[in-house]
Amino acid sequence: MGSAPQSRLELEDLWRNRVHEARVRYLKAREDLLRVRLNYAHGVPSRDGQYAVVKAQRIEIWALEAYSRAMKILHDLQVDGKLPPPDA
């Protein structure tokens, strides 16, 4: 990765980009889940189909949680002036 952000504006830009990337991942995960559910609903129920649905649900939940965390960090930075945690 590049060097650490030097200013608050650079930090905000960094987190806006992270929010955007997290949103893209979440929307893709949501689309994938809908596709898997549709395929499962129109096919013969099977353990493999059930597993695919559960896996897609977990990925979507993970992506939504990551998106929510990124939005909260950006909000806290912009509104409250709170710096993100070092491990974020």
Image: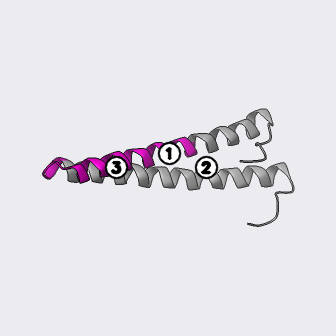
Quarter the N terminus occupies: bottom right
Which sits earlier in the primary sequence, circle 2 or circle 3? 2
Region rendered in magenta? 41-67
56 relative position to 74: left or right? left
* Amino acid type, callout 3: Leu
Visible residue check, residue 33: yes
Q: Looking at the image, do the residues carrying marks 2 and 3 touch, with CB atoms under 8 Å apart?
A: no
Residue for badge 3: 33
Instruction: Identify the residue position indicated by label 1 in the image.
Output: 62
Q: Position of residue 32 (x, y in %)?
A: 35, 54
> Dot 2 surroundings within 10 Å: few (below 14), some, or many (20 or more)?
many
- Quick one: label 3 or label 1, which is nearer the N terminus? 3
Q: Element under label 3?
A: helix
Q: Which residue occupies 25% across, 53% down?
A: 48
The kind of secondary structure the magenta stretch mainly shows is helix
Q: Which residue is mark 2?
A: 19
Tag of residue 2: none
Q: Farthest residue toward the front?
A: 47
Q: CA gap, disc 3 to disc 1?
A: 12 Å
> Mark 2 to mark 3: distance in Å?
21 Å
Q: Earlier in the sequence, mark 2 or mark 1?
A: 2
Instruction: Estimate the x, y position of residue 88 in percent, counting from the top left.
Output: 71, 48
Name the residue: 34% across, 45% down. Answer: 54
**Disc 2/disc 1 C-alpha distance (Å):** 14 Å
Q: Determine whether 37 is above or below 82 in the image.
A: below
